Image (tube, rainbow, N blue to C red):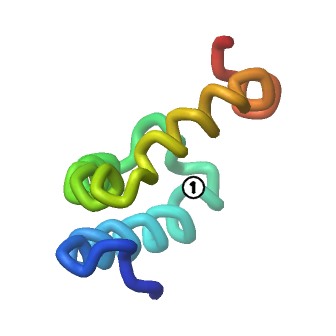
Amino acid sequence: MSQSLAKECNEAKERYDTCFLKWYSEKYLRGIGSLENNECSELFKQYSKCLQGPLKERGIDKMLVEAREDNKENDALYLGRKK
């Protein structure tokens, strides 16, 4: 698996990646799990929290907000999210 954007988050990313790949292949692809309710969500939250500081330091956090804002219609169309 690839390393995290921030070295200090590598361990959290590895735990999440390992969990996600197992869940995806063993449950989701077999119709057992759902995207909204999977056992890796807490690990994802931990990894995301770890990334917040490094993303802000590099100015990437603002770019992510802008990209999400620019793509709200596509998200609503393809991901079933509200505009």
Query: Crowding near pointer 1: few (<14 within 10 Å), some, many (20+)?
Result: some
For disc 1, the marked residue is 28
Asked whether, in this view, residue 6 is left or right of residue 61, the answer is left
Picture coordinates of residue 19, whole percent (x, y): 35, 68
Asked whether, in this view, residue 69 is left or right of residue 59, the answer is right
Q: Quadrant of the C terminus?
A: top right
Residue 80 shows in this picture: yes
Residue 40 shows in this picture: no
- As drawn, which residue projects farthest toward the top? 83
Picture coordinates of residue 81, whole percent (x, y): 65, 21
Q: How many numbered markers are drawn?
A: 1
Asked whether, in this view, residue 71 is left or right of residue 35, the answer is right
Q: Nearer the viewer, residue 80 or 2?
A: 2
Q: Nearer the viewer, residue 30 or 58?
A: 58
Q: Tell me the element at label 1.
A: helix
| Residue in the image at 33% along x and 66% along y | 16
Picture coordinates of residue 43, whole percent (x, y): 25, 57
The kind of residue on which mark 1 rests is Tyr
Picture coordinates of residue 4, whole percent (x, y): 37, 76
* 80 vs 24: above or below: above
